[in-house]
Image (cartoon, grey):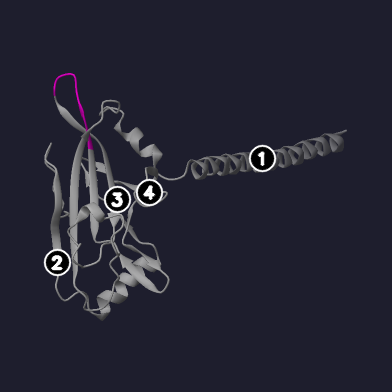
Amino acid sequence: MVESPYHHEFNKDKHGVTACVRENGYNADDFEQFTFFIDHQYKYSLYLDGLPSATILRATEGSTVFDYFTGIQVGQKHGDKYLLYNHLELTVETHTTLDGHERIVAFDVEPFSIAEDEDRFNFSKKFTAAPYTLEQDKKVTFTWSITTKKNDKLTWQSRMDHYKKTGNDDIHLMQLIISFAIVVGLGIIVALILKISLNRDLNNIEMSNTRRK
Protein backbone atom coordinates (compact mmCIF):
# COMPACT_ATOMS: atom_id res chain seq x y z
CA MET A 1 0.00 0.00 0.00
CA VAL A 2 1.35 3.41 -1.00
CA GLU A 3 0.22 6.99 -0.47
CA SER A 4 -1.77 8.37 -3.40
CA PRO A 5 -1.61 11.95 -4.78
CA TYR A 6 -5.31 12.43 -3.98
CA HIS A 7 -6.00 14.46 -0.83
CA HIS A 8 -9.31 14.93 0.92
CA GLU A 9 -10.24 17.88 3.13
CA PHE A 10 -13.61 18.06 4.87
CA ASN A 11 -16.14 20.24 3.05
CA LYS A 12 -13.58 21.30 0.46
CA ASP A 13 -14.33 20.22 -3.11
CA LYS A 14 -11.57 20.19 -5.70
CA HIS A 15 -11.98 20.01 -9.48
CA GLY A 16 -9.48 19.20 -12.19
CA VAL A 17 -6.43 18.80 -9.97
CA THR A 18 -3.36 17.57 -11.84
CA ALA A 19 -1.79 14.56 -10.17
CA CYS A 20 0.93 13.81 -12.72
CA VAL A 21 2.03 14.82 -16.23
CA ARG A 22 4.23 12.70 -18.46
CA GLU A 23 5.24 14.98 -21.31
CA ASN A 24 6.98 12.19 -23.20
CA GLY A 25 4.46 9.52 -22.37
CA TYR A 26 5.58 5.93 -21.86
CA ASN A 27 8.44 4.07 -23.50
CA ALA A 28 8.11 0.64 -25.09
CA ASP A 29 8.58 -1.27 -21.82
CA ASP A 30 6.03 0.86 -19.95
CA PHE A 31 3.58 0.60 -22.85
CA GLU A 32 3.89 -3.18 -22.86
CA GLN A 33 3.29 -3.29 -19.10
CA PHE A 34 0.19 -1.10 -19.31
CA THR A 35 -1.29 -3.14 -22.14
CA PHE A 36 -0.66 -6.29 -20.08
CA PHE A 37 -2.50 -4.72 -17.13
CA ILE A 38 -5.45 -3.78 -19.33
CA ASP A 39 -5.59 -7.14 -21.13
CA HIS A 40 -5.68 -8.95 -17.78
CA GLN A 41 -8.12 -6.46 -16.22
CA TYR A 42 -5.82 -5.38 -13.41
CA LYS A 43 -7.46 -3.26 -10.71
CA TYR A 44 -6.34 -1.13 -7.81
CA SER A 45 -8.23 0.35 -4.86
CA LEU A 46 -8.14 3.64 -2.98
CA TYR A 47 -8.71 3.89 0.77
CA LEU A 48 -10.03 6.83 2.77
CA ASP A 49 -10.45 6.68 6.55
CA GLY A 50 -10.13 2.91 6.35
CA LEU A 51 -12.84 2.61 3.69
CA PRO A 52 -12.10 0.97 0.32
CA SER A 53 -13.36 2.78 -2.76
CA ALA A 54 -16.51 1.54 -4.50
CA THR A 55 -16.30 2.05 -8.26
CA ILE A 56 -19.40 3.46 -9.97
CA LEU A 57 -20.89 1.64 -12.95
CA ARG A 58 -23.43 3.33 -15.22
CA ALA A 59 -25.69 1.67 -17.78
CA THR A 60 -24.89 4.47 -20.26
CA GLU A 61 -22.61 7.49 -20.14
CA GLY A 62 -24.05 10.19 -17.91
CA SER A 63 -26.99 8.07 -16.74
CA THR A 64 -27.84 7.33 -13.12
CA VAL A 65 -25.70 4.87 -11.18
CA PHE A 66 -26.53 1.32 -12.27
CA ASP A 67 -24.25 -0.72 -10.01
CA TYR A 68 -20.97 -0.71 -8.12
CA PHE A 69 -17.95 -2.97 -8.19
CA THR A 70 -14.71 -3.26 -6.27
CA GLY A 71 -11.39 -2.03 -7.64
CA ILE A 72 -10.53 0.56 -10.30
CA GLN A 73 -9.47 -0.71 -13.70
CA VAL A 74 -6.30 0.69 -15.28
CA GLY A 75 -8.13 1.04 -18.59
CA GLN A 76 -10.05 -0.93 -21.17
CA LYS A 77 -9.50 -2.33 -24.64
CA HIS A 78 -11.69 -1.01 -27.43
CA GLY A 79 -11.13 -2.95 -30.63
CA ASP A 80 -7.38 -2.92 -31.18
CA LYS A 81 -6.88 0.25 -29.11
CA TYR A 82 -6.06 0.59 -25.42
CA LEU A 83 -7.90 3.32 -23.51
CA LEU A 84 -6.18 4.53 -20.35
CA TYR A 85 -8.20 5.92 -17.44
CA ASN A 86 -6.47 9.21 -16.70
CA HIS A 87 -9.10 11.04 -14.65
CA LEU A 88 -10.85 10.03 -11.42
CA GLU A 89 -14.02 11.55 -10.01
CA LEU A 90 -14.01 10.94 -6.24
CA THR A 91 -17.16 11.29 -4.14
CA VAL A 92 -17.02 11.32 -0.35
CA GLU A 93 -20.22 11.01 1.68
CA THR A 94 -20.28 12.27 5.26
CA HIS A 95 -22.69 11.99 8.17
CA THR A 96 -23.02 14.45 11.05
CA THR A 97 -23.34 12.70 14.41
CA LEU A 98 -25.60 13.79 17.26
CA ASP A 99 -22.65 15.40 19.01
CA GLY A 100 -21.82 17.46 15.93
CA HIS A 101 -18.87 15.48 14.58
CA GLU A 102 -18.62 14.79 10.85
CA ARG A 103 -17.73 11.23 9.88
CA ILE A 104 -16.94 9.69 6.51
CA VAL A 105 -19.48 6.97 5.67
CA ALA A 106 -18.92 6.27 1.95
CA PHE A 107 -16.23 6.65 -0.69
CA ASP A 108 -17.03 6.25 -4.42
CA VAL A 109 -14.80 6.52 -7.49
CA GLU A 110 -15.62 6.88 -11.18
CA PRO A 111 -12.76 6.58 -13.72
CA PHE A 112 -12.67 8.39 -17.06
CA SER A 113 -10.49 8.30 -20.15
CA ILE A 114 -10.04 11.81 -21.58
CA ALA A 115 -8.00 12.70 -24.64
CA GLU A 116 -5.21 15.29 -24.55
CA ASP A 117 -7.02 17.90 -26.62
CA GLU A 118 -8.48 21.39 -26.16
CA ASP A 119 -11.24 19.98 -23.93
CA ARG A 120 -8.88 18.08 -21.64
CA PHE A 121 -9.73 20.25 -18.63
CA ASN A 122 -13.37 20.86 -19.55
CA PHE A 123 -14.71 18.30 -17.11
CA SER A 124 -18.33 19.17 -17.82
CA LYS A 125 -17.80 17.17 -21.03
CA LYS A 126 -16.19 14.17 -19.35
CA PHE A 127 -19.02 11.83 -20.34
CA THR A 128 -18.79 12.74 -24.03
CA ALA A 129 -15.08 13.56 -24.28
CA ALA A 130 -12.88 11.66 -26.73
CA PRO A 131 -10.96 8.93 -24.85
CA TYR A 132 -7.23 8.88 -24.33
CA THR A 133 -5.67 6.20 -26.51
CA LEU A 134 -2.52 4.70 -25.05
CA GLU A 135 0.45 4.98 -27.40
CA GLN A 136 4.21 5.02 -26.97
CA ASP A 137 5.83 8.42 -26.28
CA LYS A 138 2.43 10.16 -26.21
CA LYS A 139 1.82 12.81 -23.56
CA VAL A 140 -0.58 11.85 -20.79
CA THR A 141 -2.00 13.91 -17.92
CA PHE A 142 -3.54 12.34 -14.83
CA THR A 143 -6.17 14.44 -13.05
CA TRP A 144 -8.74 14.07 -10.33
CA SER A 145 -11.71 15.82 -8.77
CA ILE A 146 -13.28 15.29 -5.37
CA THR A 147 -16.78 16.18 -4.17
CA THR A 148 -18.25 15.86 -0.69
CA LYS A 149 -21.94 15.38 -0.02
CA LYS A 150 -24.07 14.75 3.06
CA ASN A 151 -25.70 11.41 3.77
CA ASP A 152 -28.27 11.57 6.56
CA LYS A 153 -29.30 7.91 6.25
CA LEU A 154 -25.95 6.12 6.44
CA THR A 155 -24.27 6.37 9.85
CA TRP A 156 -20.67 5.73 10.81
CA GLN A 157 -21.65 2.56 12.68
CA SER A 158 -23.34 1.11 9.59
CA ARG A 159 -21.04 2.56 6.93
CA MET A 160 -19.78 -0.86 5.80
CA ASP A 161 -23.33 -1.58 4.61
CA HIS A 162 -22.50 0.80 1.76
CA TYR A 163 -20.17 -1.85 0.34
CA LYS A 164 -22.75 -4.61 0.25
CA LYS A 165 -23.91 -2.97 -2.98
CA THR A 166 -20.65 -3.69 -4.80
CA GLY A 167 -20.87 -6.39 -7.43
CA ASN A 168 -23.84 -8.40 -8.59
CA ASP A 169 -26.33 -9.71 -6.04
CA ASP A 170 -27.03 -12.74 -8.23
CA ILE A 171 -23.34 -13.64 -8.13
CA HIS A 172 -23.26 -13.28 -4.34
CA LEU A 173 -26.36 -15.50 -4.04
CA MET A 174 -24.82 -18.09 -6.33
CA GLN A 175 -21.65 -18.10 -4.22
CA LEU A 176 -23.75 -18.74 -1.09
CA ILE A 177 -25.62 -21.58 -2.83
CA ILE A 178 -22.38 -23.16 -4.03
CA SER A 179 -20.83 -22.88 -0.56
CA PHE A 180 -23.92 -24.44 1.04
CA ALA A 181 -23.91 -27.26 -1.54
CA ILE A 182 -20.24 -27.99 -0.81
CA VAL A 183 -20.89 -28.14 2.95
CA VAL A 184 -23.87 -30.46 2.46
CA GLY A 185 -21.90 -32.66 0.05
CA LEU A 186 -18.99 -32.98 2.47
CA GLY A 187 -21.44 -33.80 5.27
CA ILE A 188 -22.98 -36.60 3.21
CA ILE A 189 -19.55 -38.04 2.38
CA VAL A 190 -18.53 -38.03 6.07
CA ALA A 191 -21.84 -39.69 7.02
CA LEU A 192 -21.33 -42.43 4.41
CA ILE A 193 -17.79 -43.09 5.62
CA LEU A 194 -19.01 -43.35 9.23
CA LYS A 195 -21.83 -45.67 8.17
CA ILE A 196 -19.43 -47.96 6.32
CA SER A 197 -17.06 -48.03 9.30
CA LEU A 198 -19.87 -48.78 11.76
CA ASN A 199 -21.28 -51.56 9.56
CA ARG A 200 -17.82 -53.12 9.29
CA ASP A 201 -17.33 -52.96 13.07
CA LEU A 202 -20.79 -54.44 13.72
CA ASN A 203 -20.10 -57.27 11.25
CA ASN A 204 -16.78 -57.99 12.96
CA ILE A 205 -18.48 -58.08 16.38
CA GLU A 206 -21.23 -60.37 15.07
CA MET A 207 -18.69 -62.75 13.49
CA SER A 208 -16.69 -62.80 16.73
CA ASN A 209 -19.79 -63.68 18.74
CA THR A 210 -20.72 -66.43 16.26
CA ARG A 211 -17.29 -68.08 16.61
CA ARG A 212 -17.55 -68.08 20.41
CA LYS A 213 -20.86 -69.90 20.22
Q: Are marks 4 and 1 in contact (CB under 8 Å)?
A: no
On screen, residue 73 above or below 36: above
Compared across the picture, whether 69 is left or right of 12 comes to right
Q: Secondary structure at mark 4?
A: strand
Residue 127, percent from left and from top: 30, 54
Which of labels 4 and 1 is toward the front? Answer: 4
* 25 in magenta: no
> CA separation, marks 2 and 4?
27 Å
Q: Which residues are magenta?
A: 93-100
Disc with the residue nearer the chain's start (2 vs 3): 2
Q: Is residue 213 left or right of residue 125?
A: right
Which is more N-terminal, label 2 or label 1? 2
Judged left or right of residue 27, residue 74 is right
Viewer-nearest residue: 86 or 63: 63
> Dot 2: within a 10 Å radius of its alpha carbon, few (fewer than 14), some, or many (20 or more) residues?
few
Instruction: From the image, tell me which residue sits under label 3.
Output: 110
> Would you call the spot at circle 3 few (<14 residues within 10 Å), some (14-19), or many (20 or more)?
some
- Please tell me which of labels 1 and 3 falls first in the chain: 3
Residue at point 25%, 66% (across, down):
115
Q: CA distance from mark 2 to mark 3?
A: 20 Å
Between the C-alphas of marks 4 and 1, the distance is 42 Å
What label sits on residue 21 in the rendered view? 2
Q: Where is mark 4, residue-wise?
A: 57
Q: Nearer the viewer, residue 37 or 147?
A: 147
Helix, strand or loop at mark 1: helix
Residue 1 appears in the figure? no
Q: Which residue is mark 1?
A: 188
Residue 37, placed above or below residue 150: below
Tag 2: amino acid: Val
Spot the residue most to the top.
Answer: 98
